[in-house]
Image (cartoon, coloured by chain):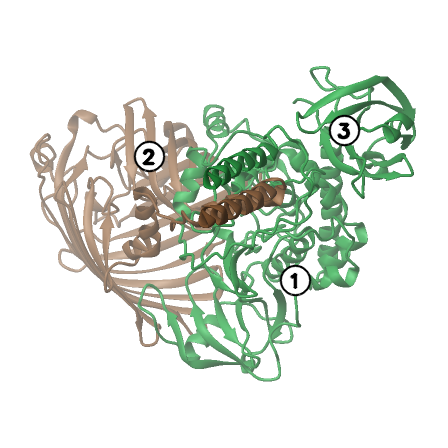
Amino acid sequence: MYRVFICAIALLCAVSVCAQDLDTRAGRLQQERQAKSSQLAPYKRNGLESLLFELKDRRVLERYQAGYKGFHPMLGGLATGSGFALGTQFRKSDIAGGALNFQTSAQVSFAGYQKYQLGLRAPALVNRRLSLAFNFTQNNFPQEDFFGLGSDSATDNRTSYRLETTEYSGTIGFRPIQKLELGGRGAIFNTNVGHGTDQRFPSTEEVFEPNTTPGLDRQPHYQYGGGFAKYDSRDHPGNPRSGGLYEIEGGYYYDRDLGLYSFRRWRMEVQHYLPFFNERRVIAFRGKLESTSADSTRQVPFFLMPTVGGSEDLRGYREFRFRDKNAVVFNLEYRWEAFSGLDMALFGDAGNVFKDVDDIRLSKLKTSYGFGFRFNTEQSVFWRIDFGFSQEGMRPFVKFNHVF
Amino acid sequence: MFSKLCSSLTILLTVLLFARIPVFAQKFFPDDPMLIDRDNLVDAGEPRVMKLSDYYDFLNNTFSSPGDPSKKPAANANTLGEVPDSSWFQNRHGQKRMTTEELVRGPNTGNGPSTTERWIVTEGKTEGITPGFRIRDSRGDHYVIKFDPLTNPEMATAAEVISTKFFYAMGYNVPENFLVFFRRDDLSVDKAAEISVGLGPKRRMTETDLDQLLARTSMTSDKRYRAVASKVIEGRPIGPFRYFGTRSDDPNDVIPHEHRRELRGLKVFSAWLNHDDSRAVNTHDSVVNAGGRRYVRHYLIDFGSTLGSGSVTAQKPRAGAEYLWEPWPVFRRIMTIGLWDSGWIRVRYPDLPSIGRFESKTFEPQNWKPEYPNSAFDNALPDDCYWAAKIVMAFTDDDIGAVVRTGGLTDSDGEQYLIQALIERRNRIGRYYFDQMLALDNFALDENVVRFAHLASQYRFAEQPENYTVSWFRFDNAKNEKTTIGNEVPVKGLTFAVPPELMSDGTQYFGVEIKDSTKRGVKGETPAVSLFLHRLSPGRIIGIERTWNVQ
């Protein structure tokens, strides 16, 4: 009986305290906190959050970009018209205390294109004023398009040929000021042309004759020597929004086997970027002239002639659609930011090939136009989808690089 | 028999006691207005470190609405509309003016890392665009050293120091951030220091690593390095807090963050200082010990992306004006080939590398946005923003100048530009939010006379209304019901008397509704302020309720 009485008093006290607590705002909060203290549980990430957390914590994207022990996967970027390519690159940049870079790569595309490369570079010698580079490149492109020479070549004459090249080159560059580079290049350059593998079209030698297509029957081995000057004031070369690139390069290909196909080659390119609206809009312009010429007793082989057409210049036409000794291309793009990560583009292209430099006329340029999507970071465009339109129809391009 | 009697008595008393518990309709409690929320009374135990994914935080906040999106009134504002002091917030400059010395000192308890001996580098950070490292000074204090980007010397460090002091003065817990200058000789690498270079595993850090790290930073003209030394926050770090929900392992965290006034109002403060990086990853929870009891203290950290700084570059022009992902602007831009765009794209910024991109001419506080949606900001109501705007307006021109000068900007034109931009942005905040409500404040009951201030005219944003209308009411606290007494009465000026009968009869709670009849919202409603008074309360005024224009 006594115990029951004690219990009753205790209960009354508890109830009284409880009621007092609930009588104040602070008391109510304290009650709530006391109640929560008995149900504490650590935070648990859900599946998606865990995945994204691990993705960042383990730096998966960075590791993908950085590769494994110097090995890096390569997606696309083999050669124009090669189709989707996969490959592996090995890079080592810490040789001789970081003064030397070594890289080698192998790429194969679904169309059977192969490219092998090996390079050794010293990009920043003598207070970053001097650079040296040695490269070896072997290409085996089994179905390069050829429609015949000249700007009036017919689409019906589409053929394919195999182009094999091997090049050993050395380049020296000098920077008197940061943005200007002057340099020279020497190379040994071996070439071979074979039967094209594109089943949809005849091989080039089945349609075209060697007398109208120089170099179709015999291919030379070259020695090359040339020089270049380049002024680059682009803010981000991988995704420029301001500045420009002004480049000129000239050289001589000496046919050391046959003596028939020695020729000179000049290439000039101007890129300029006019930003407005806080660089969220850009007018991008490019003009490009490529010119080859040979002495009267020699010829420029067709497979080394400048071309026009494809994802890099005249986007309403197929890759290598026009080919001759001279080529001119102008591109004008209006780029606008849709959101951070995507720029859109409207573009107009004009270009053509010419047999002689004297024939070059703006009125003879072929035109195309279109629009594109540029998925990007501040520094680079990593994915580009362009739709080009011309009198020969619409051409879609999906590329893993920027156009310019 | 006696036992039964006791039992019956117990039940009876229990019922009676519970009957005393106020029903939930009750508006005021005896401890109102609550000035301190003692959210450190329940021992927090050992909460685990919470690691959030910032990718997920972006997706979650951008493509869904986490937390409770119902825009109900802030849950932790007291009956006067103020925020009680707590582990989240301490009323400072907004409630009682801080001296210039206090504003300049900010959260700093000392003078930064001791310079009597070399700083010992204990850990290196190589990832990211700007490098950094941790040091230990001769006192044994630990600091994180952060630098400016090469393209914008002084920008990020000045922004970090200046914004730290503003956020502290506003009332938030922030780290002690010091502007420091040092030479290479002032540093040496600890034998146990580690560094992770590139993606490699951590390894012992060498003096050469430190040289390479410093080579990626800029030097002042007298060959010193300029940096921010951020003192490691007291207590055991347990990760960030989110701007919604509560922390499931903190017993004291019972108010959903999206309903906390200081987090809703942070939208206004962030707009003022362009703190577009106001997201979970830039917050910090720390378990501290007070008298043997552990509780969680909540911090804002990392102000490198404030003012005109984007931490590693100048702030992006979009920052503050548009989320990283907003479907409508993107759709419109695509469909109009970029001919349509928001105003931010045309804003011109002066060429001031140490300031970055910061301006005031096109600043619209109500339209300011962080990098991606924030549940607390989205829930902010006009009274939350009004509360914050009052604190922003508490910073005088001189206060702003004094705080900005702590950033150590050597470009005096840039410094002056920043001061003027902050003054103009402050005024735009005051002008806008004081127009959303009837901006009557600083109420006092002085010998049965109610005195108040009209903030919009006090700060010269508007004319003082010629007269107001007041209507008195008795208030039944238990039922939360008003009974109007008499008619609306026009009053002139910033005072009016309490009707004598209300002071002399037995009414416990009474109040008055004040309106500016010349000010009407878009639907014709009149914004009003209601004062609630209690006969026996020492301050008498125990509640302020505001209604606003419906937008």
Relative to B478, is B118 on the left or the right? left
| Residue matched to label 2 | A385
Q: Specify the quadrant that holds the C terminus of chain B.
A: top right
In space, the residues marked 2 and 3 are separated at their CA atoms by: 58 Å
Farthest bottom residue in view: B117
Towards the viewer: A292 or B427: B427
Residue at 60% over, 56% down: B173
Residue at 30% over, 54% down: A60
Please check whether the numbered discs 2 and 3 fall on a single chain.
no
| Residue matched to label 3 | B529
Q: Residues within 10 Å of mark 1 (few under 14, many from 20)?
A: many
Where residue B404 appears, x then y in whole percent? 71, 57
Q: Is residue A321 above or below residue A100?
A: above
Which label lies toward us, 3 or 1? 3
Shown in green, the chain is B
Where residue B420 appears, x then y in whole percent? 76, 48
**Amino acid type at image mark 2:** Ile
Q: Earlier in the sequence, mark 3 or mark 1?
A: 1
Q: Is residue B489 above or below residue A170?
A: above
Please check whether the numbered discs 3 and 1 fall on a single chain.
yes
Please check whether the numbered discs 1 and 2 fall on a single chain.
no
Shown in brown, the chain is A
What is the secondary structure assignment of the residue under circle 2?
A: strand
2 and 3 marks in contact (CB < 8 Å): no
